[in-house]
Image (cartoon, grey):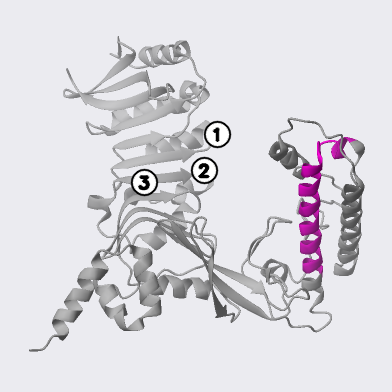
Amino acid sequence: MNSKPLTYDSLKTVIQYLDPNTRFLISSRAPSIRVAEKAVPLIIDKLWIKVHQVSVNNISYECELYQVDCKDNLPYRISGVSRLNRKLTCNVDEFGTRDYINAAGGMLPGNNGNMESNLFGFYDLEVIPTNEGRMQKLEEIFKIEKQRLDQLINYRPKEEPNTDEITSFHKFKCIRTDPPRIYNEEELEILKNEEIVKMAIEYIKERIKEMENELILFQNKSKNIRPKFEIHLVKYQGNLSNVIERVKYTGNIHKAVENLLAFMFSKRRHVVRVNSFAMDRTCPVEIPDDLKMRIKSLNLYKNVSPILKILKPIIHEPSSTLEKLTLFIHPDEAENLDYEYIANSKLLLCDMLFTSSSSSLSSIIRSLRNQKVDFSFCTTQFLRSEDFILVIRNWLETNKPIGTCFTFPLYNSKDETVIRILNKFKNRFVNATAGIECVNIPMGSSAKLKISYFRNEPSILCLKMAVVPLD
């Protein structure tokens, strides 16, 4: 009797009851079971594809680029958002020059007449046209940072009791001195006791170390020095120790992320089921072209249009499976949104800049085709505007179907304000009538637009537009 099919089926049965991250781990350590693992349906609670990172449920896998031959023998992280100037780095060239510097023709950031921070995060509108001049400026800042450290080492606080150390330390970190200078007495007095001073000293030491590394990185090219870089694939899991696997760096960190995604999701025989999915599209990372996902909840907070373009061929049967879609819609990209595809979601949670012009907000709201939309925020100023009247007219003229319902939360608003707004609606539309905490506007012979207000569970005042059957 041939037992191989039984062994294979038994293995698939065991895999079926393992959580996704355990499956990834076993598959990475035992390549012989990968075919069986790919043959078992994969169910994920939360999946988030971020910048250089993939998070699956409670575990994150991040590709991080390091220089590994630093003089102190400690790896120095290159990729990610700099703690000094908040700029994102993905890749470096053979000398370690950051990609955003190469993209600017090799020029150091800052001192170009624009409100752009320099390599250390300081703003200086003085125009310095050469890298030599900008480097001299950075070296002066570096010297001042060392003087700041000496100030802290020699500072003796008054030892005030009952001090909130975390708050004081964060207040100290938020000190901005553009142009850079040493601390004055008032700034030093933020450090109320010796413990906070120690925290500040360690913070400045870290800044000095990062500044020094940044200067060395940029100077490598002029000295013809080629550092050694490698990618660390780091597994983060709560308070557990991080697990690191080293990967050869070939000049493209995005390829490492793509390989990670391919290992997890490509060549699967079944559609991957995901309860909640989110994606950031800051980097040009390709998703496996054979990946299919059935998603219940989709969350897109920026770069909505390009991300939707990527996800459309990946999401399986969105009209029947997509229960909730959370979007941040920026007015600048509203015109290019695929409103027809967005309408696949049974519930749309919409976040918009209600500080934008009321005409652009009105245009976006009128373009939404979803039956149920909950906005995260709204202003009474917008509801009072003629542009919101256009929203109401649009619903009446297009005969929105029964069941269509949009809800607008109004933080820090009073009932009296909303009542005045409803009275305005009643006076602007023919045959509109007042009801209990609502205004009803006829929509043909079988439906009406009911605009009402209520308070939700957190006691936030909300205005609701709903198409309901006639009584």
Question: In front of the other: label 2 or label 3?
Answer: 3
Magenta-highlighted stretch: main secondary structure? helix
Q: What element carries label 2?
A: helix
Left or right of 210? Residue 184 is right
Is 41 above or below relative to 8?
above
**Residue tagged by mark 3?**
325
Over which residues does the magenta segment extend? 186-215
Q: Which quadrant of the structure image shows residue 22?
A: bottom left
First reached walking from the N terminus: tag 2 or tag 1: 2
Contact, CB < 8 Å: mark 2 with mark 3? no
**Residue tagged by mark 2?**
331
Real-space Cα separation, disc 3 to disc 1, in angstroms: 24 Å
- Frontmost residue, 177 versus 377: 177
Badge 3: how crowded within 10 Å, few (<14), some, or many (20+)? many
At label 3, which amino acid type do we have?
Answer: Leu
Picture residue at 25% right of the left edge, 63% below the top: 17
At label 2, which amino acid type do we have?
Answer: Pro
